[in-house]
Amino acid sequence: MMNIRPVSDLRNRYPDVEKDVLTSGEPVFLTKNGYGSMVLLSLEMYAALTEDVETKLLQADAQAEATDARCSADEVFGRVRKRING
């Protein structure tokens, strides 16, 4: 079940919010005036979410350094559109 709390809980009940994030292993969604404002994650959760992206970026940087070949924006976005549209 989603843990949704008002953003004021960061000020008034920080230890409780921190405990919820760290013990549940789930994000805490914060609202302000009834609307979504932020999401709190533990460092471990954030690392797990971003690890794959960072690895792919490092691989792309290494590949770019290994070759002089470059693609224009039109070529790149054309390939992306082809993949998306089938």
Image (cartoon, grey):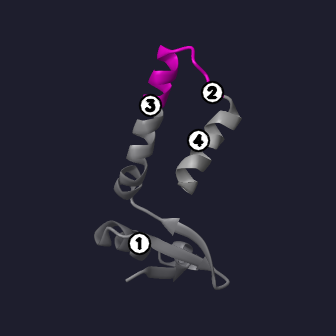
Kindly indicate whether the residue at mark 2 contacts the one at mark 1 (C-beta within 8 angstroms).
Answer: no
Identify which amino acid the numbered label 4 is placed on: Arg
State the image coordinates of residue 37 (x, y, percent, origin top left): 62, 72
| Marks 3/1: CA–CA distance | 36 Å
Identify which amino acid the numbered label 2 is placed on: Cys
| Marks 3/4: CA–CA distance | 21 Å
Q: Secondary structure at mark 2?
A: loop
Over which residues does the magenta segment extend? 58-71
Identify which amino acid the numbered label 3 is placed on: Leu
Identify which amino acid the numbered label 1 is placed on: Pro
- The numbered mark at residue 79 is 4
The residue that mark 2 highlights is 71
Name the magenta segment's main secondary structure.
Answer: helix
| Marks 1/2: CA–CA distance | 50 Å
* Mark found first going from the N terminus, 1 or 2: 1
Kindly indicate whether the residue at mark 4 contacts the one at mark 3 (C-beta within 8 angstroms).
Answer: no
**Quadrant of residue 55 within the rendered picture:** top left
Q: Secondary structure at mark 3?
A: helix
Q: Residues within 10 Å of mark 3 (few under 14, many from 20)?
A: few
